């Protein structure tokens, strides 16, 4: 489990497709404190550490994960791609964002950016199947970042990114057309499932 509070911006150092996609991620984390098999959210995708070096960790990414995220495809990860990183939540850690599983539901696309004071309002388009889970003033995780939804209009929704968030995550580099990993709020998912039995 994660909180959606980004604690490092790493970068893809190497990619190798050997049936599954193997990735090496550069990080500022103290890797001596990371165990093999640990979970690290990389742009919101919970990935398992399978190798460690002094300033990097290795992960393996399955075809299922590639199909649900922005990792693969024409605009997917390449060497140098910056990544929002978060280590798994430990008992006693502050829950500063919201409960995030690292299980991405789909991909959203940035369709508009507009500066509002020091903040930037970003508008996202989402698949219709996921739009019903997004509510005004609810939470979403976008590329692993816990954000509050401002408004919803059909299959579009907006969030505001404050300067601090732009400085400590990859959001300061966002552009229209970017595809981002979307995880809907866990509570919304279960409420919708329960309503199917009414």
Image (cartoon, helix red, strand yellow):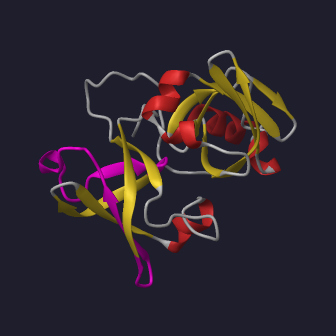
Which residues are drawn in magenta?
16-45
- Image location of residue 9, percent across then percent down: 39, 43
As drawn, is 198 to the left or to the right of 30? right
Residue at position x 47%, y 43% in the image: 101
Horizontal and vertical percent for residue 42? 43, 51
Residue 66, compared with residue 149, is above or below; it is below
Residue sitting at the far top: 117
On screen, residue 166 above or below 94 = below
Is 79 on the left-hand or right-hand side of 122? left
Q: Image quadrant of residue 134?
A: top right
Coordinates of residue 198 in the picture (x, y in percent)? 78, 36
Q: Is residue 42 left or right of residue 106?
A: left
Q: Nearer the viewer, residue 122 or 173?
A: 173
User: Which quarter shows the N terminus?
Assistant: top left
Q: Is residue 173 magenta?
A: no
Residue 113 in view of the camera: yes
Which is nearer the eye, 125 or 185? Answer: 125
């Amino acid at each position: 489990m994660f909180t959606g509070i980004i604690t490092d911006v790493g970068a893809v150092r190497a990619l190798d497709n050997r049936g599954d996609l193997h990735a090496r991620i550069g990080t500022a984390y103290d890797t001596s404190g990371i165990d093999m098999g640990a979970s690290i959210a990389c742009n919101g995708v919970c990935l398992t550490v399978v190798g460690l070096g002094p300033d990097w960790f290795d992960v393996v990414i399955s075809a299922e994960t590639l199909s649900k995220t922005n990792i693969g495809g024409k605009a997917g990860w390449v060497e140098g791609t910056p990544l929002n990183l978060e280590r798994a939540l430990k008992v006693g850690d502050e829950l500063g964002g919201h409960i995030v599983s690292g299980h991405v539901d789909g991909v959203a696309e940035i369709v508009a950016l507009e500066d509002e004071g020091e903040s930037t309002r970003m508008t996202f388009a989402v698949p219709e199947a996921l739009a019903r889970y997004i509510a005004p003033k609810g939470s979403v995780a976008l590329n692993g970042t816990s954000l509050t939804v401002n408004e919803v209009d059909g299959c579009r929704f907006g969030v505001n990114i404050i300067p601090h968030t732009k400085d400590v995550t990859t959001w300061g580099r966002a552009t229209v057309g970017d595809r981002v990993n979307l995880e809907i709020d866990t509570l919304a998912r279960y409420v919708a499932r329960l309503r199917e039995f009414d």
